[in-house]
């Protein structure tokens, strides 16, 4: 699998922003669009003591850190590409998501029906992959893709605009997996993972294994308001950084660009600490895992900045898609 494409656009990590769905980042694991969006790397110990489990990650109960390998990435790439082909074919990105089902034309109804069938198939595949990954947090991402995807499909016949938040949680959790896999394949994850301090263990010991139909936030978390505020602040504090060309490596930066990137690294480290703190006080095991993983990838990207190459953008995109997963879960739970 090759590096990211040479051209990209700048995105914003804002709670209320327009979200690129998985036409790019999810649909093509290997060639995600390079944008500026706002666990231990080794496999966890396999289940032992003769205890059989539905999940290969059953014994992964420790700290969440940057992931440097996962055997499900190739399979997920196939699922994502097939899903993306359907999305492209119905021009999903261009739809008016504010139009309710009662107002759909026959063409709009056909597009939602096609998307729903593709989402249902991808959700089933993700549930299978969730059982096979050795990483707890990757399992959680697969199963949240499944849970929110299925919930959205159920809403399609009576769709209203707020239901789109369910689809966005699904697509951003899928994007998170794609970006994690991109960072693995392009070796940006393995380059920074040993340089970071391991995160602390989960707040609650022995995190529960969820069923694949359980959304992780049915009512707004107590941290949702702070999460949104942190997103807005991060967006404001990285304004200059987001104007830079992410396709230029560090060796190509001007002195001014070097200074902007150094300042951005400081902002990212501060934000990472905030994300982790919010996750740990949320009292939601899955939200905590997503928050800590986002923090580690954001720290990893900050660590990569002095020697930045385009492949390192997978680290930034992983953090961004994880944050959006939580952001839109907050919206969907309202």
Image (cartoon, grey):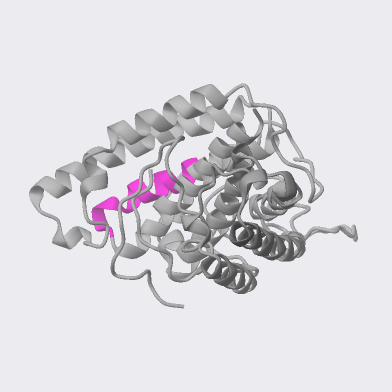
Residue sitting at x 54%, y 36%: 327
Residue 5 found in image quarter: bottom left
As for residue 317 lying within the magenta part, the answer is: no
Q: Is residue 143 left or right of residue 247?
A: right
Residue sitting at x 54%, y 54%: 176
Part of the protein shown in magenta? 295-308
Position above or below: 184 against 150: below
Residue sitting at x 43%, y 28%: 230
**Horizontal and vertical percent for residue 308?**
28, 58
Residue 251 found in image quarter: bottom left
Q: Main secondary structure of the magenta part?
A: helix
Can residue 201 be seen in this snapshot? no
**Horizontal and vertical percent for residue 50?**
90, 61
**Who is closer to the viewer here, 327 or 67?**
327
Residue sitting at x 40%, y 41%: 13
**Who is closer to the viewer here, 316 or 113?**
113
**Horizontal and vertical percent for residue 193?**
46, 54
Q: Residue lying furthest left in this view?
A: 255
Q: Is residue 84 left or right of residue 208?
A: left
As for residue 305 lying within the magenta part, the answer is: yes
**Horizontal and vertical percent for residue 263?**
23, 38
């Amino acid at each position: 699998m090759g590096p990211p494409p040479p051209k990209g656009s700048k995105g914003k990590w804002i709670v209320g922003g327009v979200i690129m769905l998985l036409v790019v980042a999810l649909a093509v694991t290997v060639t995600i669009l390079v944008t500026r969006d706002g666990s231990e790397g080794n496999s966890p110990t396999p289940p032992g003591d003769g205890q059989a489990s539905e999940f290969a990650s059953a014994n992964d109960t420790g700290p969440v850190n940057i992931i440097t390998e996962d055997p499900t990435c190739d399979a997920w790439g196939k699922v994502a590409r097939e899903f993306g082909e359907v999305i492209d074919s119905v021009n999903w990105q261009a739809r008016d998501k504010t139009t309710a089902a009662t107002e759909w034309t026959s063409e709009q109804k056909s597009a939602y029906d096609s998307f729903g069938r593709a989402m249902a198939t991808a959700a089933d595949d993700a549930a299978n992959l969730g059982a096979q990954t050795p990483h707890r947090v990757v399992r959680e991402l697969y199963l949240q893709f499944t849970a929110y995807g299925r919930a959205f499909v159920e809403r399609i016949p009576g769709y209203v605009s707020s239901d789109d938040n369910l689809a966005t949680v699904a697509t951003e959790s899928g994007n998170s997996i794609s970006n994690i896999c991109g960072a693995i394949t392009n070796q940006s994850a393995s380059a920074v993972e040993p340089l970071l301090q391991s995160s602390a263990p989960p707040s609650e010991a022995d995190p529960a294994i969820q069923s694949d139909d359980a959304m992780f936030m049915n009512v707004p978390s107590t941290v949702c308001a702070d999460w949104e505020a942190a997103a807005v602040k991060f967006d404001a504090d990285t304004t200059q950084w987001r104007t830079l060309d992410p396709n230029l490596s560090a060796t190509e930066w001007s002195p001014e660009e070097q200074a902007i990137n150094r300042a951005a690294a400081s902002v990212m480290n501060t934000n990472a600490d905030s994300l982790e703190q919010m996750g740990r006080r949320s009292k939601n095991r899955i939200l905590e895992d997503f928050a800590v993983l986002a923090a580690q990838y954001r720290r990893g990207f900050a660590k990569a900045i002095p020697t930045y190459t385009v492949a390192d953008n997978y680290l930034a995109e992983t953090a961004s898609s994880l944050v959006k997963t939580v952001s839109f879960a907050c919206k969907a739970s309202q």
